Amino acid sequence: MTVRNLEFLFRPASVALIGASGRLGSVGAVVLANLRAGGFKGPIWPVNHRHALVNGEPAWPDVASLPQAPDLAVICTPPHSVPGLIADLGRRGTRAAIVLTAGLSASTADGSSPLVQQALDAARPHLLRVLGPNCLGLLVPALGLNASFAPGGARPGPLAFVTQSGALATAMLDWAGGQNIGFSHFVSMGDCADVDFGDVLDYLGSDSGTRAILLYIESVQSGRKFMSAARAAARNKPVIVVKAGRMPAGARAAASHTGAIAGSDSIFDAAIRRAGMLRVDTLEALFDAAKTLAYARPQRGERLAILTNGGGAGVLAADSLAMAGGTLADLCPATRASLDACLPATWSQGNPVDIIGDAPAERYAAALGVLLQAPEVDAVLFIHAPTAVVSANDIAALCVPLFIKADKPVLTCWLGGPAVAAARRACAAAGISTFPSPERATAAWMQRVLHARNQEALQQIAPAASADFRPDLAAARHLMAPAREQGQAWLDEMRAKRLLQAYGIPVVQTRTAVDADEAAAVAGDIGFPVALKILSPQVLHKSDVGGVALGLDSAEAVRSAAHAMLQRVRQMRPDASLQGFTVQAMAQRDGARELILGVTTDPVFGPVILLGAGGTDVELHRDHAVGLPPLNARLAADLIDRSGLAPFLAGHRGRPAADRGALIDTLLKLSRMVCDLAPLVELDINPLLIDASGVMALDARVRMLPPGADPRTPLAILPYPVQLEESLELGGQALELRPIRPDDGERLRAFYAAATPADMRLRFFMSRREVPLAEVARFTQIDYDREMALVALLPGALDARRLVGQVRAVCDPDNQQAEFAIQIATDWQGRGLGRLLLGRMVDWLRSRGTAEMVGECLPENRGMLELARKAGFETGQGADGGTVRLRLPLR
């Protein structure tokens, strides 16, 4: 993940247009006209190798002849010319290019690599960033930059819009202009050959001029990179997504039930939720969510009060809220009494609060004041339908100041047209969300609710391991190794169950038998009744071929069932290798529910965990949910809630409730298994019985990668590396060393606040009195794959632990270079803590194969220079001449 040189893309000081043209209607002519019309203050250099003048302006024949290296180049020349132009720009010193040209991905006639790969190869040595190819371009309205061939411009505003669809981009610009919607950035991504959603999210997440980020996504290339950037950006500001392709064209073919049920769209939903973003279905909802999330007060809870002068409008709002799963606030007696004091006796006496159609402005203001003060109300939806009694302008004049002062969210709905237009404008000017209908307003409120829930999921960190559970990892790997080496994709049933046992998941007693007679004998040992199942690596769904017999209550019944089973399976699956049978005790658990618990591997987001209603007809059930590992107890509970299984698990008509805690524990163990075992790509536990006494797995299937196969798509979210935690003593003082966590935000702010101005200047190369909250969030909410930050804490109560030192390193995408920084509290300098932290970071980087560690410091930072010298760093002049460059080879 990198934002290297993206400032030249999004904030260039100069632009060269390669392929500039005076030919009417050509892309080169449209882009040149847009660049001129946008009001860009820097130089714009047209490049045309045939004409010295373009539209009467001087043009340059090639990159080498330009007055200086442009910060940004826009390329709209034929495909075959693009790689050479990128190479020329890189050598000249340009660090960003927008390639509008399409057709670079096609195979070349001479069999060489595609043109797009040639262009990337040419860009890489110069760290030149490429947006596109096959894109519409880029607009940064605040700079007057319109480096696109869009038919119009955009006005400045606080929203960033990033889209993969060029056609949608042009339509969006036209629509937004009519709606007076402005943009901080408007980015057409094209083929995402280099700059992708992850890069843009990383940049915009820290951009002070962007209040919310809107995405239109058709596909994601790298799940982990996307998730890393999305999680970082969503901690700073709302990120709202529309993704094409919600409805699948057809059922997914998969060997396991889990693979069939967990469609790619449900997995994308799970990724969006875990990243703290919000997904909506339409562009209209995209902008509704943007104005609701970007301008409203912080979320307090989910209980909504509806204030209206029309009973019908209130009922519509309440109905749409209920259908969306929302919560109406239950007004407490004190609130009702306060409303009685300011409303006529005929008011609705409940929520929605109908203040009657003849309500004057003062009645609105009084009732609104009561609801804004009510502790049981988390937000207010204000609805007004025009009447002849009082003008909407008078109501707005009294109520808008109350909206502004409110410490809880307020949404407004001014029903009608011209009669309420001025009131709508007054709300919009005050930053108050307003909607044309009750349904749109409640939908926007539920967007806030879902976003808040997703933000809560974002704050959850899950360790790869827990302190109170240790699986038998050696046994698990030993079970998988022989089958993998023999080229078997699936573990047989016995090994699959033993794998579950290695992770502490209860399984029904099961034994194997090679023939019918041995099966009958084994059944006698286990005790009747038993279940008999065919044992074959080729037969995964045994019931489909008659490979299961249940409730066998005698040796003869087992023997007869075994013979009949062999005959059926041989007829239906003549290709299958029949290795015998499994015999298992019948689980005698009246009232137990059947669940499915599984794992599948998505090609983009990697392993996902599925939970749902189980049984032989599992793929017909709608009750299921998917989540991204690693899980913690909170995330596991959320997965259960989203699966729709809560009523199924609850007690009913004398049947006791199922053990929810045992299910959470099983989900955590399965999550641990996924994190531990990289060859595991698919798993079914179906059915998983659950009742008041716990869970039991009756059947299991496990698919593995064979040796030498391409690695499994990595986990989209790397677990918190608990293995890096340690306790030690330094100079007689106990210290805790560990990776930084999201809950270290306040500690880090206090650390910076306590630092001297001199220390802050040495760390940040400039004078700083404080570090902004968004920057603190970015420093603490890291992705442990691309970045590491180790902190030293003094012992004490959890909330009182003081942070006294930190070291962090950020690796480039190719793992060639890691840039590091270190800071030690003033009273801990000179005590060996810096050497200790730096050594731990060097160890971590070496363990992941990073080639070198680099950094910069000011020449007067003698402590850092001495520390680097003792650690073996090479020193040299920094890039700008005013710093010292530090370098330590690690390989």
Image: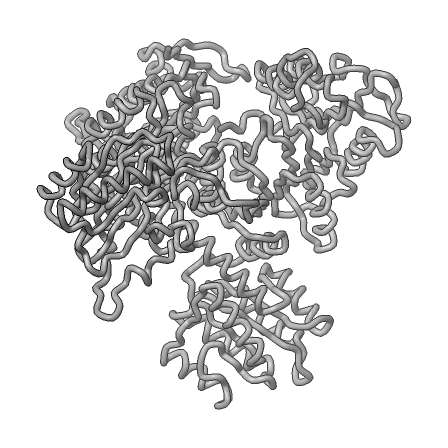
Which residue of the protein is positioned furthest toward the bottom in this rendering?
Answer: 345
Q: Quadrant of residue 848?
A: top left
| Residue toward you, 769 or 162 | 162
Q: Quadrant of residue 178?
A: bottom right
433 shown above or below 758:
below
507 shown above or below 832:
below
> Can residue 507 be seen from the camera position used here?
no
| Residue toward you, 595 or 536 | 536
In the image: residue 375, left or right of residue 126: left
Which residue of the protein is positioned furthest toward the left in this rendering?
Answer: 525
Which residue of the protein is positioned furthest toward the right in this rendering?
Answer: 56
Residue at 31% from the left image edge and 23% from the top image edge: 484
Residue at 58% from the left image edge and 69% from the top image edge: 438
Q: Position of residue 356 (x, y in %)?
A: 56, 84
In the image: residue 652, left or right of residue 340: left
Q: How many marks?
A: 0
Residue at 33% from the left image edge and 28% from the top image edge: 678
Q: Position of residue 258 (x, y in %)?
A: 39, 43
Residue at 63% from the left image edge and 70% from the top image edge: 414
In the image: residue 680, left or right of residue 32: left
| Residue toward you, 871 or 534 | 534
| Residue toward you, 440 or 587 | 587
Q: Position of residue 549 (x, y in %)?
A: 25, 47
Give the colour scheme shown. one colour
161 shown above or below 694:
above
**Quadrant (top left/top right/bottom left/bottom right) for the C terminus:** top left
Q: Position of residue 453 (x, y in %)?
A: 42, 54
In the image: residue 196, left or right of residue 570: right
> Can residue 372 be seen from the camera position used here?
yes
